[in-house]
Amino acid sequence: MDGRRGNDGNEGSRNSAGQKEGGLFGRDESQNRNSQPGAQSAYGQGSYYEESNEEDLYGRQPDDSYDGSRQEQRGGQPEEDRSLGGLSPWLRVWIHPRQVTRDFMRSSDPLRGALLLALIAGVFNALNTASTRNSGDTMTASGLAVSVLLGGVIGGLATYYIGAWLMKLVGGWLGGVGSTQDMRIVSGRISGMLAIMVGLFWIPELLIAGMENFTYSTPNLDASMLRTLLYLLFVLLESGFGIWSFVAVLHAAGEAHRFSAWKALLMFVILGVCVFFLAFIVILVVALMFGAAFGAFGL
């Protein structure tokens, strides 16, 4: 059994404010919006003119903003502690990623635990990378563990700091208004929570296959049909939740930038292309420099 995959919609529902959560790639929509004739779209430079008791497109009162009061309360509870049906954000993020992102952005401590979540998520992503590359064929178990930990920490830091800045930059090209801190909420808290929960599938997979998760040859796993089927079940579940988590991240990034999840997908595509070409240019320059150095010494 060779290699595995990397780790990487929801129906609308109405929240307590009477808003409708967006569909698979949609935006939240507000109902009963009383706009004046000259008002522009909420995504333009204008704003909706609403009655004082109505909330805007992002669940705020007309005079609220993400950079304004972080201590807003509803029903006597801080915004960051509100939850639908008492669900934890770890569960709500799967079905209402926009609302969870909005709550984090408006909380008194928007980046609480974000860096730690990004580092843990980086370790799980490093596990997936090691499995895809069959790193166990050339490394011992201890060496693989050290490699995964180091790679995970580096990857987590890069995602949290550099990735957030790039999402802010590219999102701005598409009309997004999210700040670098907003993007760190997405790359740290939202993406981190989702990646960690998907990464929990590694526990049964390691118990079933052990080091064969990281090797090309899997004789022990292949010897038992039951173990093979059970292993494949967890792999499929992990893949399914991985796709779901990516869609949730698109919604979260869209909420932070105040645009749709489709535009967030375009942002990630552009970001991926830019990173690819940047890496290609760096590798090309390094290769040319080494080539020139070897030529100068007649090597």
Image (tube, rainbow, N blue to C red):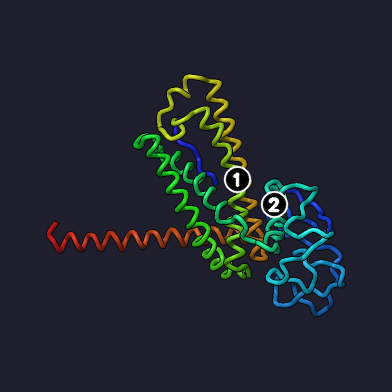
Image quarter (top left, top right, bottom left or bottom right) of the C terminus: bottom left
Image coordinates for residue 182, horizontal then vertical, percent: 62, 64
> For this rendering, which residue is in front, 75 or 35?
75
The mark found on residue 24 in the picture is 2
Mark 2 packing: few (<14 Cα in 10 Å), some, or many (20+)? some
Q: Which residue is mark 1?
A: 243
Rounded to the nearest angstrom, the CA distance separating label 1 from label 2 is 12 Å
Q: Is residue 15 left or right of residue 104?
A: right
- Report the residue at 48% width, 24% height from top: 221
Image coordinates for residue 284, horizontal then vertical, percent: 32, 60
> For this rendering, which residue is in front, 30 or 131?
131
- The residue under label 2 is which amino acid type? Leu
| Outermost residue to the left | 298
- Report the residue at 85% width, 67% height from top: 54
> For this rendering, which residue is in front, 78 or 49?
78
Q: Is 1 above or below relative to 117?
A: above
